[in-house]
């Protein structure tokens, strides 16, 4: 049976409403948005990490650890109140690694979809932007894990959808998901499973603008949103949406988020060692706690662990 055709919405009316209802930092009710970042966690240089750094590795810029990061949503990455200073959990993790390597941190704002090309071209040394480890990606990149990958399904606070615990619970719903993401692949597999069981198809909706997507959910043009739990949980603090269920980002397998570097560049083992030192000394936990992400903490960073299988 064929999949229900995905529907792409680009509605000017919703976009206008979004601009009216959701001004800049509308959901930035927690976390440190002071440009001075007085609460940011810093680290000491790690001899262990530096010993594992390949002597042949050439950084994108001398004396600097250059990192590509998508700055589109808190708590992962956004701008401070001055609209130019980068803040969020991804900049904080990047800073811990840079400090461990004894280098200044330079963040390069990117569109998430552009990170592979930017990394391969040498524009930056690493990407710290909620990238999940997959076997396909491991063919081109190295990984140093730093967070568990958890997905959340969120609905409008007064939604009739009580909970989503298994694939059949999304049958017949209009679900927003990011294009070309692991969660999209999971939703497609759920839909296939439901169709095979004779259940109603999912209407899949894609939005290029996160604010527009949120307004679509609020205006009942969609029933649910499936995406990284960290992002949706942060936004749900305003009480307009609520959690209906959580799943591993690799459902039914577990998955991890990782610092991504060029394949065979000689940087990954040093980054992994840096992260493990910060896990042991407590800086890692403090950095995640600043953005309420302690629930996604890992016990140990790993270089190129088993990733999600190819589809």
Image (cartoon, rainbow, N blue to C red):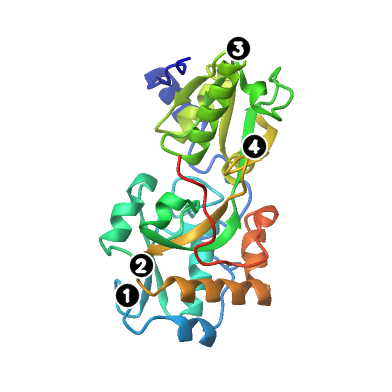
Mark 2 vs mark 4: in front: 2
| Residue at x 25% of width, y 60% of height | 121
The disc, 2 or 4, on the residue closer to the chain's N-terminal end is 2
Q: Is residue 240 above or below residue 221?
A: below
Q: Sequence-wise, which precedes: disc 1 or disc 2?
A: 1
Query: Disc 2 versus disc 4: distance between alpha carbons?
Result: 33 Å
Badge 4, how many Cα within 10 Å: few under 14, some, many 20+? some
Could you say where residue 185 lies in the image, as x and y percent from the top left? 49, 34
Residue under label 1: 59
Q: Residue furthest right?
A: 162
Choose the circle earlier in sequence order: 4 or 3: 3
Q: Is residue 243 left or right of residue 91?
A: right
Picture coordinates of residue 113, whole percent (x, y): 36, 45
Q: Earlier in the sequence, mark 4 or mark 1?
A: 1
| Whether label 1 touches label 2, CB < 8 Å | yes
- The disc placed on residue 143 is none
Tag 3 or tag 2, which sits nearer the N-term? 2
Q: Which mark is residue 198?
A: 3
Q: Nearer the viewer, residue 52 or 163?
A: 52
- Spatial separation of the CA atoms under disc 2 and disc 3: 48 Å
The residue that disc 2 covers is 125
| Residue sitting nearer the eye, 236 or 121 | 121
Task: Tell me the tag on residue 236.
Answer: 4
């Amino acid at each position: 049976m064929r999949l229900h055709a995905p529907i792409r919405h680009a509605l000017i009316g919703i976009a206008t409403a979004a601009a009216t209802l959701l001004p800049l930092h509308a959901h930035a009710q927690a976390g440190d948005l002071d440009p001075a970042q007085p609460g940011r966690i810093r680290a000491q240089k790690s001899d262990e990490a530096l010993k594992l750094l390949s002597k042949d590795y050439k950084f994108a810029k001398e004396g600097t650890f250059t990192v590509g990061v998508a700055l589109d949503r808190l708590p992962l990455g956004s701008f401070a109140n001055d609209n130019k200073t980068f803040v969020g959990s991804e900049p904080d993790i990047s800073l811990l690694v840079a400090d461990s390597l004894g280098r200044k941190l330079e963040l390069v704002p990117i569109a998430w979809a552009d990170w592979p090309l930017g990394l391969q071209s040498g524009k930056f040394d690493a990407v710290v932007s909620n990238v999940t480890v997959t076997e396909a990606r491991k063919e081109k990149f190295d990984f140093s894990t730093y967070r568990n990958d958890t997905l959340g399904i969120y609905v409008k606070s007064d939604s009739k959808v009580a909970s989503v615990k298994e694939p059949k619970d999304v049958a017949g719903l209009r679900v927003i998901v990011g294009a070309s993401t692991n969660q999209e692949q999971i939703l497609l597999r759920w839909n296939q499973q439901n169709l095979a069981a004779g259940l109603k198809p999912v209407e899949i909706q894609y939005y290029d603008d996160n604010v527009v997507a949120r307004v679509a959910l609020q205006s009942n043009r969609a029933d649910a949103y499936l995406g990284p739990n960290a992002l949706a949980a942060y936004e749900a603090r305003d009480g307009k949406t609520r959690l209906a269920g959580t799943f591993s980002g690799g459902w039914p397998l577990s998955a991890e988020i990782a610092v991504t570097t060029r394949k065979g560049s000689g940087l990954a083992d040093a980054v992994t060692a840096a992260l493990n030192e910060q896990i042991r000394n407590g800086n890692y936990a403090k950095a995640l706690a600043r953005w309420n992400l302690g629930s996604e903490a890992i016990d140990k960073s790993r270089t190129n662990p088993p990733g999600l299988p190819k589809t």
